[in-house]
Image (cartoon, helix red, strand yellow):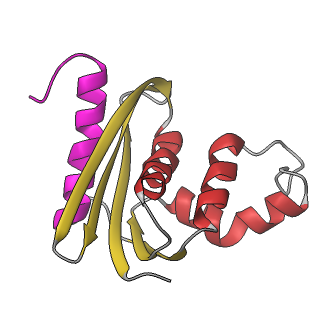
Amino acid sequence: MGEECSIYTDGACKGNPGPGGWGVVMLYRNHRRELHGGEASTTNNRMELTAVIRALEALRKPVEARVFSDSQYLLRGLREWLPGWKARGWLTAAREPVKNRDLWERLDQLSAQHHLHWQWVKGHAGIPENERADALANLGVREFLGLGRN
């Protein structure tokens, strides 16, 4: 596997559902890459998942990476729920269809290409890269709404 990089991701939503955005900060050696985007009608959980998906899609080769997120939904989904969902044909323990299945399937596919270490970080706790990912997610919402970078 390649050298380790750090990936910070965050999602934002104005209303839930409502317009949303996602942000990513990727660090590799002395390189820094930032990504962001937005969608019209979405949820915060979808934006959290989308941020990680966009980060992994941006990687040009398999890597070892530490992925930081403040989303318990994302981390519990990956660590606890995903194996059961797959075993039950994408049904929850209550036999309901898994929400955001399209994104979970894509994330599962992309994750298999890398050696990823998932780490929770407290949101809005002054961690510079996490704060920047949050700012990029909110920028994604503003740009989508035509409000620019202000």
Q: Is residue 144 magenta?
A: yes
Residue 126 in view here:
no
Looking at the image, residue 51 sits to the left or right of residue 77; the answer is: left
Q: Residue furthest front?
A: 61
* Residue at 59%, 59% in the rendered image: 110
Q: Position of residue 52 (x, y in %)?
A: 46, 55
User: From the viewer's perspective, is 18 left or right of 139?
Assistant: right
Residue at (82%, 53%) from the top-left corner? 92
Classified by dominant secondary structure, the portion drawn in magenta counts as helix
Q: Is residue 79 visible?
A: yes
Please state, as top left, top right, bottom left or bottom right, where the C terminus lies in the image.
top left
Q: Residue 35: x percent and y percent?
A: 29, 47
Q: Is residue 110 above or below residue 83?
A: above
Identify whether 14 is placed above or below 46.
Answer: above
Q: Quadrant of residue 102?
A: top right
Locate residue 41, reporting x and y percent: 49, 22
Q: Number of labelled discs?
A: 0
Asked if residue 130 lies in the magenta stretch, the reply is yes
Residue 16 vertical placement versus 78 (above, below): above
44 relative to 129 in the view: left or right: right
**Magenta segment, which residues?**
128-150
Q: Residue at x 24, y 26 (%)?
A: 142
Q: Residue furthest top?
A: 146
- Rendered location of residue 19, percent (x, y): 40, 24
Q: For residue 37, what is the image quadrant?
A: top left
The extreme left residue here reads 150
